[in-house]
Amino acid sequence: MRHPDAPAPGELLGSHYDQCFGCGGEQPHGLHLATRARDGVRVTAEFTVRPAHQGAPGLAHGGVLATALDETLGSLSWLLRVIAVTGRLETDYVLPVPVDTVLHLDAEATAVAGRKIYCRATGRIGGPDGPVAVRAEALFIEVKVDHFIDNGRPEEIRAAMNDPDSVRRVRAFEVNP
Ligand SMILES: CCCCCCCC/C=C\CCCCCCCC(=O)SCCNC(=O)CCNC(=O)[C@H](O)C(C)(C)COP(=O)(O)OP(=O)(O)OC[C@H]1O[C@@H](n2cnc3c(N)ncnc32)[C@H](O)[C@@H]1OP(=O)(O)O
């Protein structure tokens, strides 16, 4: 169920961490995904494949495409108002994705059971209604903020805790009655 305080449909979700490879603005070769809330527990995003994202000449690396799917699926957290990490991500690569292509991503949660969030995503090329190039089914697991504090490298954790925007974002996720 969408949380009552979830961002409204159409609203841009913003980055959860400015150094994130998927969505952070401070990663020069990152994916710079900008994700929007949609109805229900659904989000959409666009990812433009850059030369830094190649695997084969002129084609997107499969791991980068998996990252785009992972990041979009992770953004469903904003609508559920929980912090969650990827437990399992199964990816189908249906079409090659050339450099400069815009990948239109669409993710939705399909079920929640305790801490487990089941979800799926597609990435289409040639427009939001174009053919599916990649798709994923995933299981995200809800965690507390301590997951990052206990496991992250101390210098980045300290920097995040000293950044008021970062603390505000995490607090918003923690309150989930
Ligand atoms: C103040 C500032 C401080 C810092 C601020 C930070 C802010 C950050 C905000 C937001 C971040 C969002 C980041 C999104 C980025 C995109 C998403 C990613 O790429 S995340 C990275 C990749 N993923 C991992 O690194 C997980 C590594 N794995 C783990 O840590 C553990 O394995 C974890 C937490 C996933 C589960 O461990 P357990 O000990 O908590 O829980 P157990 O009991 O093992 O599992 C719970 C249930 O889930 C099932 N489960 C777990 N893993 C599964 C799997 N792989 N396949 C199937 N089921 C699985 C289990 O069978 C269990 O199910 P049953 O409740 O018994 O029914």
Image (spheres, grey):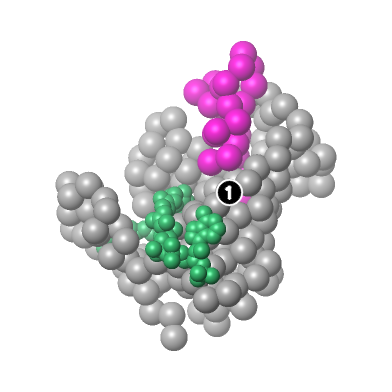
Q: Is residue 157 found left or right of 92 in the rendered image?
A: left
- Confirm whether the magenta stretch covers residue 55: yes
Q: Nearer the viewer, residue 62 or 17?
A: 62
Q: Whole-percent x and y of residue 153?
A: 22, 47
Q: How many numbered discs sit on the rendered protein? A: 1
Looking at the rendered structure, the kind of residue marked 1 is: Leu
Q: Is residue 130 left or right of residue 144?
A: right
Q: CB at mark 1 closer than 8 A to ligand 1? A: yes
Q: Can residue 104 be seen in the rendering of this structure? A: no
Most foreground residue, 23 or 110: 110
What residue is disc 1 on?
89
**For residue 14: magenta?**
no
Up the image or down, 138 lies above or below 83; here it is above
Q: Residue furthest top?
A: 57
Image position of 57 with respect to 42: above or below: above
Q: Quadrant of the C terminus?
A: bottom left
At a point 70% along the width and 40% down the height, the residue shown is 92
- Name the residue rendered at 44%, 30% in the picture: 29
Q: Residues within 10 Å of mark 1 (few under 14, many from 20)?
A: some
Residue closer to the observer: 101 or 88: 88
Taking the image as drawn, is residue 118 in sight? yes
Q: Please identify the quadrant where the N terminus is shown.
A: bottom right
Identity of the residue furthest to the bottom in this view: 177
Displayed-image quarter of ligand 1? bottom left
> On the picture, is 58 further left or further right than 20?
right
Nearer to me, 27 or 121: 121
Residue in view at x 40 percent, y 71 percent: 173
Task: Answer above or below: position of 163 versus 32.
Answer: below
Magenta-tinted stretch = 44-67
